[in-house]
Amino acid sequence: MRVLVVDDEKLLVKGIKFNLENDGYEVLTGSDGMEALEIASREQVDLIILDLMMPRMDGLEACRRIRETSDVPIIMLTAKADDMDKLMGFEHGADDYLTKPFNILELKARVRALLRRSGMGKKQENKQVLTVGHITLDVDARNAYNDGELTDLTAKEFDLMELLMRNPNRVYSRQSLLDTIWGYEYHSEIRTVDVHIRRLREKLEKDPAEPEHIMTKWGVGYYFKV
C-alpha cells in the first residue's frame, strides 16, 4: 500500500520513509502543503501523514482541500500539544493526531489502525505468509522455506527477501535497497547488496545460475519476478 509523508523536516521524513518501507509500504514524500495537494491529486495513496506547520501552505489548509475530493485517512503531525490545535485538525478533516517528538512504533501502529479502520489494511495484514512458486516466507516466525524445507537466512537476507516478495516485479536499485534494508547501519560498499542477492539465490533458487524469481534488471537493480 502507498503512504504519502509530507513534512518540511527532511531528516524526519527520511526516518519515517525508512521505517514504513521496512514494513512493506510504498512511500511518497513532499515538503509542504502545496506538494501534498499536488501529489494527492496525481497519485493514488492509501494514507497521508501530514505536518501541521509547513511553508507555502500549512497542513490544516492542505487537509481541508484534500477532504474536498478524498476521504483518504490523514494523520496530522505537530510540535504543539495544544488541544485547540488538535480540535482544528479534526475539524479540517484529520483522522488522527500525533505530537512531536513521537515514537516511530506508535506512528506505525496508528498507520495500521487507520488502514484497518478504513478497510485498506485487511489485505496487508493477511499477508503474513508469502508464497510464490517454491519459495515461502513466514513473516511472523521469520522463517524461509525452499520447496517446503526450512532454509536458514540471516536477518538482513530475510528483510531483503521480504521486501522483494511484498513488492513483486518492482525493480529496486542497489542504493535503494541499501537505504531501505541497511539504513543508518550501512558502512560498507554498495556491493554488499550483490553478495546478499547471490546468497539468497544459493539458498532459495532451484538453480542459482538460472533463477526463477530473484532477478537482475541489468544496469538498474534487482526484483522479485512473479
Image (tube, rainbow, N blue to C red):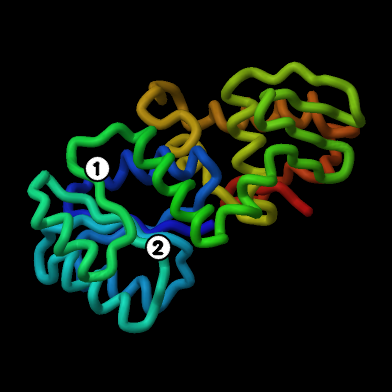
Which quadrant of the rendered structure holds the C terminus? bottom right
Residue that appears at 74% across and 33% down: 137
| Left or right: 207 as drawn, with respect to 98 | right
Closest to the observer: 122 or 182?
A: 122
Residue 89, image quadrant? bottom left
Q: Which mark is residue 12?
A: 1
Distance, label 1 to label 2, CA atoms, is 20 Å
Residue that appears at 22% across and 70% down: 92
Which mark is first along the chain, 2 or 1?
Answer: 1
Q: Which residue is mark 2?
A: 73
| Left or right: 164 as drawn, with respect to 114 | right
Residue that appears at 41% across and 38% down: 19
Residue type beneath disc 1:
Leu
Q: Nearer the viewer, mark 1 or mark 2?
A: 2
Q: Residue 85: x percent and y percent?
A: 11, 56
Residue 196, image quadrant? top right
Closest to the observer: 38 or 108?
A: 108
Closest to the observer: 122 or 42?
A: 122
Q: Residue 156: x percent and y percent?
A: 57, 24
Residue 50, image quadrant? bottom left
Do the numbered discs 1 and 2 sit on residues whose CB atoms are within 8 Å?
no
Q: Name the element at disc 1.
A: helix
Residue that appears at 50% across and 61% down: 118
Q: Which mark is residue 45?
A: none
Q: Name the element at disc 2.
A: loop
Up-down relation of residue 139 to residue 94 (above or below): above
> Crowding near pointer 2: few (<14 within 10 Å), some, many (20+)?
many
Which quadrant of the rendered structure holds the N terminus? bottom right
Up-down relation of residue 8 to residue 24 (above or below): below
> Crowding near pointer 1: few (<14 within 10 Å), some, many (20+)?
some
Residue type beneath disc 2:
Pro
